[in-house]
Image (tube, rainbow, N blue to C red):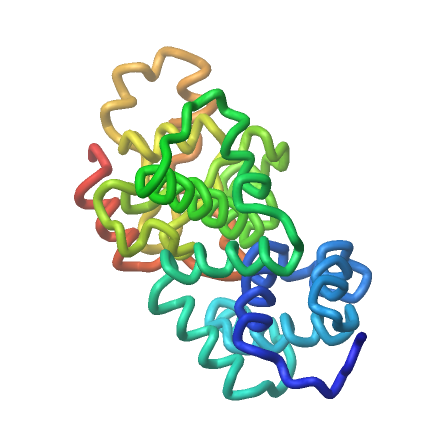
Amino acid sequence: MNNANRKWSRDELVVAFNLYCKIPFGTIHIHNPQIIELAKALGRTPSAVSWKLANFARLDPSLQKRSIKGATHGSRADIEIWDEFNNDWDRLAYESEQLVARFTGISLEQVTQIDSSGIIIPDGREREALVRIRVNQGFFRATVLAAYSYRCCLTGLSISELLNASHIVPWAVDPSNRTNPRNGLCFNALHDRAFDRGLITVTPEHKIKVSSRINSFSKEKAVVDYLISYEGVPINLPDRFLPDPDLISYHNTKVFQG
């Protein structure tokens, strides 16, 4: 039964923040099917859920820097959930997906399609570890792509099958930031690969810098069109979760092949 005056539990807030992360800011409204679906699962109204997501938006520094405002007030509990996620993305990403599965009645394996890849999933702790990795990878991708409104930050390409959530600091290097959306950029598949291999980077001013290694291929039209021509071009910044300057600095100095 819907009850507008019912206090939000921590589990409900975690699930709501999960959805806040995974839908574009401009789609936070009562007609969004995902908001309607979550409201039904929580026994709340779409209005209550959309308002809660707007409460989270007011806490988002990235939105504040762009003069985009969420709700004008919220609860102390909202702040606590915001801090929980931002202090430990890896743990909260996984916990939130577990709670989504519980509220919706869908298993984590179904949510992540973990058995559809043809990979034999081991039992016991190995299975649990693999499921956790797959779940958190899915959360990271969904959150980064939503922050960039499902468009490549460089080209504007919006074909989701060709978009990747690129780690600024590589997955293997910094476990604490594996699931942090501020460690992510939305690139198309080509520029994701170039970024991952250090053939391009993003400067502190959020402009593309192309490696000098590319110069030896400058006679190739495709190289000029798809790489060299982007030198100095500013990326489109996300609505939420702006790239962390310290992580950008790491990529500039440790990954980029100047």
Q: Residue at x 77, y 61 (%)?
A: 36
Is residue 89 rendered to the left or right of residue 146?
left
The image quadrant that residue 46 belongs to is: bottom right
- In the picture as drawn, the residue positioned furthest to the front comes out as 124
Q: Position of residue 55 (x, y in %)?
A: 61, 78
The image quadrant that residue 83 belongs to is: bottom left
In this picture, is 163 found above or below 83?
above
In this picture, is 80 found above or below 131?
below
Q: Position of residue 66 (x, y in %)?
A: 54, 68
Q: Position of residue 44 (x, y in %)?
A: 75, 72
Is residue 178 rendered to the left or right of residue 51?
left
Is residue 51 rendered to the left or right of residue 85?
right
| Rendered-image quadrant of the N terminus | bottom right
Q: Residue at x 18, y 42 (%)?
A: 254
Q: Nearer the viewer, residue 51 or 199?
A: 51
Q: Position of residue 105 (x, y in %)?
A: 65, 53
Q: Residue at x 37, y 38 (%)?
A: 127
Q: Residue at x 65, y 75 (%)?
A: 52
Q: Nearer the viewer, residue 112 or 156?
A: 112
| Rendered-image quadrant of the C terminus | top left
Q: Nearer the viewer, residue 197 or 220?
A: 197
Query: How many numbered discs sit on the rendered protein?
Result: 0
- Does the rendering let one see residue 234? no
In this picture, is 216 found above or below 202?
above
- Does the rendering let one see residue 69? yes
- In the picture as drawn, the residue positioned furthest to the left comes out as 254
Q: Nearer the viewer, residue 255 or 212?
A: 255
